[in-house]
Amino acid sequence: MSDMQTVYSAFTAKIGDVLSALEAEGALPAGTSYANVAVEPPRDPSHGDLATNAAMVLAKQAKTNPRALAEQIVAKLNDDPQVQSADIAGPGFINLRLTPGVWLDEISAIASQGDSYGKSSMGAGQRVNVEFVSTNPTGPMHMGHCRGAVVGDALSSLLEYAGHSVVREYYINDAGGQVDTLARSVHLRYREALGEDVGDIPEGLYPGDYLIPLGQDLAEELGDRFQSKPESDWLAIFRAEAVEKMMNLIKADLKLLGIEHDQFSSEAALHAAGKPDRAEAWLRQHDLVYDGILEAPKGKAPDDWEPVELPLFRSTKFGDDQDRPIKKSDGSWTYFGADLAYHMQKAETADALIDVWGADHAGTVKRIKAAVAALSEGQGKPIPFDVKLVQMVQLMRAGEPLKMSKRSGNFITLKEMVEEVGKDVVRFTMLTRKPEAQMEFDFAKVVEASKDNPVFYVQYAHARIHSTMRKAAAEGFAPSPDNLEMLGAEELDLVKQAAQFPRLVEAAAQAREAHRIAFYLYDLAGAFHAYWNLGNDRPDKRFIVADNAELTGARLFLAAQLGQVIRNGLRILGVDAVEEM
């Protein structure tokens, strides 16, 4: 629930009091659970200001029909001086119309709470580990990583705003064969930096020009000491150096997007600390790992396949379609085996886990959820675990698919993208669709000054409010809370829209969906622009009414609070609220 009272939290409490009174009178049984009672805006604004499903969800417990219970609830709500009317709709929904004073108080609440308006204590300090990006440290950040980075960071901010304690974590995949390939690729560039003609980059090595500066750095640091030495002499050194330098590059790229992780966990360190062995021992102890033989892969003739006994995790116990090996036939850990140990490590210090993955990992979700469910048993408490799958982004320019960048290999880097359109455009655009939906990022469209461009539309609303304040100050007017009762129905409709922000923060945090904030801000900006446009035809509806200082002060005060809500929402998304455009 919200730290400070807002319309929705106040009326949720009022309805709770009404239900408690009915319980005391015997109309509801003692100990009735109100967990499913919701207070929200009605789907059709013409039905009222608020709606509640209380009678619908409690009628069964009350052993009566919803309309009969609704009548008892409505009778009590109509006694409330803040309720203009309470009506029953359909099978038992209750619609409330509130007095204008309720909405005027909400304007003052936004002003007094300022940057904290919409913050909630709902999370109760729950420790949530959000792991995102976690790309292999073999190249610079590119567009394939960008959307997941923004989704993970915005989700982390949303959870913090809703009262959770969040750790943003990056898992460095620095133990696989791809890191050896990186080391060999950097060694080639190191030899090149020492003046050797290395010719074309051999097949199987990373060809990107981004490795040239790394080779030059190592040539300066190490001299020619490893130029002609056998691989066994330099592989480990070049692997460690290359991973460190690539991670510095990745961190710098993420910083361009305003993203900084709290924690970096290394897969190599996980292995060195024996964490996978410990996880296996615990799982065997709890009969969740056994030695068995996998079925032959589908479509393979028996003579193509040798049955090998492997340690298998009982993932079928948790809904997977087959048990999964945690080690390969050579005794090395499968990626799943290491991942399982990594999640066990995270579960030691977190109350809930969230992973943000690319949609290409969809096949792994069921088994890793099974693993975390199993490991939760070992923690003595269930660890909620959520995987957010993020679809790839199709890059376009003026409607045409984009040709890839030559200087970076075969991709557009995140750095190139941010340099062209700016951090705010990238971040907001990545949140204009649900993460699991496909999206196009058109370099021409995302910088358009039009209603069809959500980031422009929202930032323009904030800039317009600031421009109005500057104009008003030049003409001798100032925002004032003294005459808010002069505001009419159209202005109160704006307040009603703004007042949804605190409940939306809680709902979005509960659903783990930061994009809901972007959708909400677009709607709020739309309502503001629509009101603004009223003033084009009706001078009496402008924010500055030259011959009425009291009304102007009240409207400016309202505008300032709308700007505050837009700022608070944009801050969650990591987007700047600009003051002029």
Image (tube, rainbow, N blue to C red):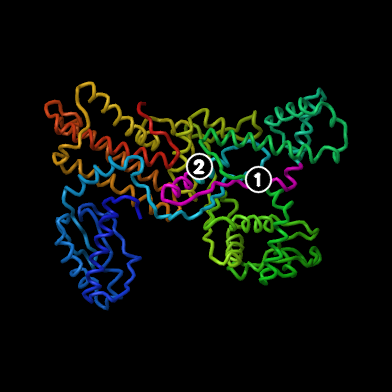
Kind of residue at badge 2? Val
- Which span of residues is magenta-colored? 154-180
Residue 341 at x, y = what percent? 66, 58
Q: Residue furthest left?
A: 547
Task: Identify residue type, mark 1.
Answer: Ile
Q: Which residue is mark 2?
A: 150
- How far separated are the C-alphas under marks 1 and 2? 18 Å
Task: Look at mark 1 in the image and give the residue it sits on.
Answer: 172
| Disc on res. 522 | none
Q: Pointer 1: residues within 10 angstroms few (<14), some, or many (20+)?
A: some
Let me know if residue 522 is in the magenta part.
no
Closest to the observer, 10 or 215? 10
Question: Is label 1 in a helix, a strand or a loop?
Answer: strand
Please state the horizontal and vertical placement of residue 312, each as a whole percent of the image.
Answer: 71, 66
Q: Is residue 412 visible?
A: no
> In this picture, is 332 found above or below 556?
below
In this rendering, is residue 580 above or below 411?
above
